Image (spheres, rainbow, N blue to C red):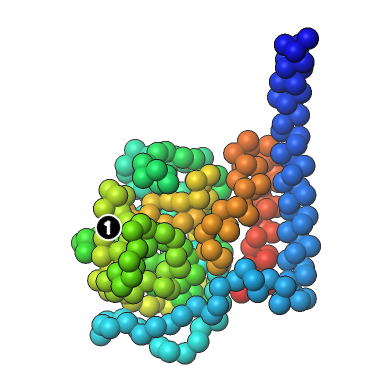
Amino acid sequence: MDRRFLQFKRRLATRHLPTIIQLVVISFVFATIIYMSAKFFYPSISNFMAPTTLPTTPRSTTTTIRTTTQQPFEIGCFFDKTNVTLADGSTRSLDALNIGDEVLVYLSSGQFEKSRVLTVFNHQRSSVRFLDIYTTDDQDPLRLTPSHSILIKKNNIQQSSFCYDYASNIVIGDFVLSAQSKPKQVINIKETILYNQTISTPLTFEGNIIVNNLIASCYATYHHKFMHILSIPIRYWYQIETFPQFNHFIIHLIEFYSKLSF
């Protein structure tokens, strides 16, 4: 009796699991639409999730462009010519990255493994403020927006491990983590403003990606842990590859939201 019940339960779970996931994602999307609409008309409801205005602490270098003027809250992404590390160790420009490509990702255990690109979010902006992060390596700087998250270890406090923080919080002397699991010290930070620019962010199931040989989050604007939890339905939706025609709707929905808010 118990064995037949377990077999029935297993068949039921296998048969209805995709439907359950679809219902969860659809519910999540509708809840997101309601939330975004409410935020547009009543912006104060989401203040508990948003960080304070991004800091613009002056940098102690003559090549860094910084002002003490408060900057508006910005959407976060990468420069579209950023190099992404693929699963085989080669690199590919972000603007040439395709859905389904296998890239290298970082695990919380400290190991690396390959993962599939679930989708790529692209945003077209008339002007974008970037930060160029230079490290002790002779490689191209990582160019990303100030509100994008990256693995950082602060130099001026007792911090035993790397954690995700906004690029705007990096200062010269801090450490970022390379694809070889080696800390690289930040030696310079430059601010650049580009016009008529496409900014992009790939999404992996693990929520991170290796760009210009540094480990960075797939998320921006809000804290990495919060975004990784919030994106669970979307990541599973892309992972099981159901209703691919609905994927474009999710991408356009996020783009519509970003234009409303930023």
Residue at screen point 71% across, 77% down: 44
- Left or right relative to 174: residue 1: right
The residue nearer to you, when weighing 200 against 115, is: 115
**Residue 59 seen anywhere in this rendered image of the structure:** yes
Query: Which image quarter: residue 253?
Result: bottom right
In the rendered view of the protein, which quadrant contains the C terminus?
A: bottom right
**Residue 198 seen anywhere in this rendered image of the structure:** no
Residue at screen point 58% across, 57% down: 227
Residue 51's x, y, as percent? Answer: 56, 73
> Height in image: 129 above or below 15?
below
Helix, strand or loop for disc 1: strand
The residue nearer to you, when weighing 62 against 169, is: 169
- Left or right relative to 98: residue 88: left
Residue at screen point 32% across, 82% down: 59
- Amino acid carrying mark 1 in the image: Pro
Query: Which image quarter: residue 169?
Result: bottom left
Residue at screen point 43% across, 82% down: 56
Within 10 Å of disc 1 (Cα), the crowding (few <14, some 14-19, many 20+) is: some
The residue nearer to you, when weighing 164 against 114, is: 164
In the rendered view of the protein, which quadrant contains the N terminus?
A: top right
Residue 246's x, y, as percent? Answer: 71, 46
- Left or right relative to 32: residue 130: left
- Left or right relative to 1: residue 71: left
Residue 66's x, y, as percent? Answer: 38, 85
Residue underneath mark 1:
183
How many marks the image carries: the answer is 1
> Height in image: 152 above or below 213?
below
Residue 153's x, y, as percent? Answer: 34, 63
The residue nearer to you, when weighing 210 against 164, is: 164
